[in-house]
Amino acid sequence: MGSVGIKEIKFFVPGEAVSNDRVIEDHGFDEQFIREKLGILSRHIAAEDEYTSDLATAAGAKLLDETDLDPNAVDLLIVVTQTPDYCLPQVSALVQDRLGLPSSVAALDINLGCSGYVYGLSVAQGMMEANGFDNAILITAETYSKIIDQKDRATAPLFGDGSSATWLGRNPAYKLGKFDFGTFGKKSDSLIARGSGMRRDLIEPLYMNGQNIFNFVMSSIPKSVAKCLEANELTAPDIDVWIFHQASRYVLKTLAMRLNIPTEKVLVDIADIGNTTSSTIPIALCRGILSNGPRPEKIFMSGFGVGLSWASVVIMSK
C-alpha cells in the first residue's frame, strides 16, 4: 500500500454574505480596522435553521459529487467541530447517514478549533495505517455565528461560518510529513464559550482575549515551525508555500516577519470569507493550491487557537 495523504479538498460556505458595510451600519465597527488589519471584506453566516451538520454534509456531498471517490469505499469519517448540533450524538453520525456512507464506516468527532484540521490529518493517518483503511473523509465545519454576540467588536467582524471536506487516501497529491503538536491550557480561557456545554449556569456568548492569543501565537508558533522543519529534515528556504491558520491579515504578516520568511510565500485567503476557524487551512489549500495551476512541492501548514493549541505539518507532492 502507498503512503496516506491528501487527494482532494472541497469546501462550502453558507449563502448569506455579510459585508463590512452591513456590519458597520448595524454596529458601528471601524471599517478601516476590519479591512486593513483583519483583512476582511465580507464573511458568510449560516441561516437561522442551518447548523454545523448541514455545512458538513454540504462539503462532503461536493467531495463525493465532484471526485471519483465511491461512498461505499469510505472507511473513516472524521468531523472537526466545536459547534456541534447536539452534545450527543456526534455530528459525524448525522453526516454518515446523510452522505449515504456504509454502516461499516468508523465515524467520530474531534473537538478542536483552529488547530483541528492539522490534528485531524494526523488522527486520520494513524487510524488508516493502523487499520488498513484506504479512504477517509476529514470534514471541518463550524457555525460560530450562533455563539457570537454580534455587537462584540472582538469577534463579530472576524469570524465566518464554513466547512471543508478532504479526501485522504493512497497515491495522494500530497503525502503527509511529520507533525508537531502542543497545548497551553493555562490560558485556555482566552477563547471560550461559557455555557456551551453542560455548564448552563455560565451561559455567555463567545469571549476572546485577542492580546493573549496574539502573544501565544507569536511565542509558540515560531518554536513549532522550527521543531517541525527539523523533524522533516528541512529548512525554511525549502518550503515553497506557507499556510497558517487565517486568523487575520495582521497575524499572518507579523508571523512572516517573526519567522523571516518572504511574505509572498505566505498564503492569505481571508478577505471574502473571514476566519472560518478549523476550515481556514483546507479552504486556503483548496483555493490557493489544488484549484490554481502548478502545485508547489513542499507546503508548511500550521493551525493555532482554541485550547490554546497548535499543530504543524509539512506536506509534500514528491
Image: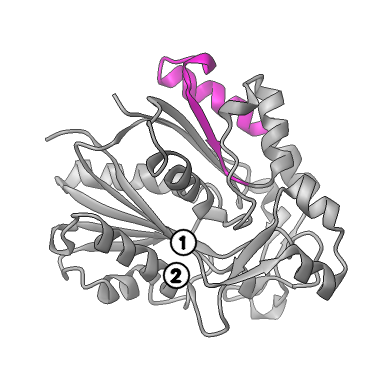
In the rendered image, which residue does mark 1 sit on? 163
Name the quadrant of the C terminus.
Answer: top left
Q: CA distance from mark 2 to mark 1?
A: 6 Å
User: Which residue of the protein is positioned furthest toward the bottom in this rendering?
Assistant: 49
Crowd around label 2: few <14 · some 14–19 · many ≥20 (10 Å): many
Per the rendered image, the range of residues in magenta is 219-246
In the image, is residue 245 above or below residue 101? above
Q: Is residue 256 left or right of residue 55?
A: right
Residue 273 location (% of width, % of height) = 59, 58
Q: Which residue: 78% across, 45% down? A: 37
Residue 165 location (% of width, % of height) = 37, 56
- Judging depth in this view, the residue of 115 and 164 nearest the camera is 164
Q: Is residue 40 visible?
A: yes
Lower sequence index among marks 2 and 1: 2
User: Which residue of the protein is positioned furthest toward the front in this rendering?
Assistant: 293
Which quadrant of the figure has residue 107? bottom left
In the rendered image, which residue does mark 2 sit on? 55
Residue type beneath disc 1: Ser
Q: Which residue: 50% across, 65% down? A: 13
Q: Which residue: 70% across, 66% down? A: 19
**Label 1 SS:** strand
Residue type beneath disc 2: Leu
Residue 289 location (% of width, % of height) = 43, 38
- Judging depth in this view, the residue of 228 and 156 nearest the camera is 156
Q: Is residue 181 visible?
A: no
**Label 2 SS:** helix
Residue 111 location (% of width, % of height) = 48, 59
Which quadrant of the figure has residue 292? top left
Q: Is residue 226 magenta?
A: yes
Crowd around label 1: few <14 · some 14–19 · many ≥20 (10 Å): many
Name the quadrant of the N terminus.
Answer: top left
Q: Is residue 294 magenta?
A: no
